Image: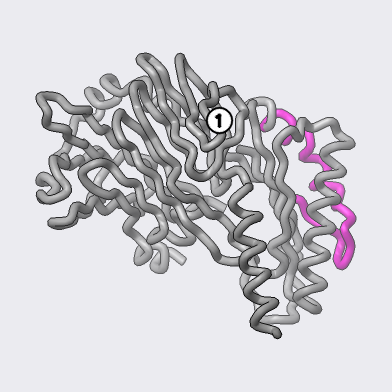
Amino acid sequence: MGMKALVLIFIFSLSVMASESVAFIKSIKGDVNIKRESGLIQAKKGEKLFSHDVIHTGEKGGIGLSFNDGTRISVGEKSVLEIDDYLFDPSKKAFRFDLSLRKGSAVFESGRIGKLAPEKVSFKVPQGVVGIRGTKFLVEVE
Amino acid sequence: MEPLLIWSVLILSLPFINDKPETMVVLLDNNSSHNAIEVQTNSSKIIIDQPYYSTTLTSMEKNPSEVKKLDPLTLNEKYADVLGNLPSKEISLLFYFEPGTSEIVQSSKDQVSNLISSVSSHEPASIDIIGHSDRAGDADKNYALALERAHAVEKFLIDNNVNLERINVVSYGENDPIVPTEDGVSEPQNRRVEVIVR
């Protein structure tokens, strides 16, 4: 009985998280589109982004993003960046940050996920993966 | 409040020049001595822990190139657009409370003009209001009290016409103290609401 209730709660909380926004658009230059399951969206300042959104920037285009944990990302022109998976729930100690840059350029400055769970950050590029190293440093400083 | 481990990394995937796609990864300087990244392929991985050092990836099946130093000036000039577009760092303010209540202390209320200018300089801004308690009393009650305090700050901001278009109100209860204590200890510094403008 207790087990069943637990499973139900778990499923419920997953579905709630899936529908929450993970970031929003701070700035935009030129032509930028967001590809989402529901279709193609013209990016606008202040617009919320979700896991699985794919950002496409055109020539001379660019976008600045702010994620829920304080991570900031700038995507340069002629780029494709996908938010593969994102979860920031410090009260449950649940973290996940998977991104893929398929082409173009990006600058990444990490926020609280990088501090609380650096091993959960993975930035994929076509030929490899960039991760955070430094849990050891964190412990030494604290 | 300053994150202990922050890092910036400039990733450049140069698309398909002569059918040879390459990705350059550069660690930038963010004034943190704990700035380090790991760059990995199926074949091996390397660490970059010095600002303006970079590696180039040519294939998932090959080693990342030897780390080499780039000239900061050339880099900053060449990638000025993508570097300049990085949103500014978040601003964090703390509100404190009378013991056992959700009454904001006057000195915290006095920060409101400061907060309004932070919000307008961060436009479009998002505001996170996070309630925290100390460890005096029951954990569940502390969770509820911290949430009540977070809502008190939300109401205070609404009453002061702060733009709350994107707002998120949560409670961490007694789980994220500024000053770690034993259970049952009353600690004024931990009875706070954190307002993050980003």
Total marks shown come to 1
Q: Position of residue A47 (x, y in %)?
A: 61, 30
Q: Residue at x 41, y 68 (%)?
A: A139
Q: Is residue B94 visible?
A: no
| Display colour scheme | one colour
Q: Residue at x 54, y 63 (%)?
A: A94
Above or below, B187 relative to B83: below
Q: Quadrant of residue A48?
A: top right
Tag 1 residue: A25
Q: Position of residue B111 (x, y in %)?
A: 77, 40
Q: Position of residue A56 (x, y in %)?
A: 41, 27
Query: Mark 1 is on which residue type?
Result: Ile
Q: Residue at x 69, y 31 (%)?
A: B119
**SS class of the residue under badge 1?**
strand
Within the magenta stretch, is there residue A107? no
Q: Is residue B50 visible?
A: yes
Judge the density around disc 1: few (<14), some (14-19), many (≥20) Cα neighbours within 10 Å. Answer: many
* Residue closest to the eye, B145 or B17: B17
Within the magenta stretch, is there residue B103? yes
Is A24 situated left or right of B56 in this image? right
Q: Position of residue B135 (x, y in %)?
A: 73, 75
Above or below, B56 relative to B32: above
Is A22 situated left or right of B116 in this image? left
Is A106 situated left or right of A117 in this image? left
Q: Residue at x 45, y 52 (%)?
A: A97
* Residue closest to the eye, A11 or A27: A11
Residues in magenta, as a range = B95-118
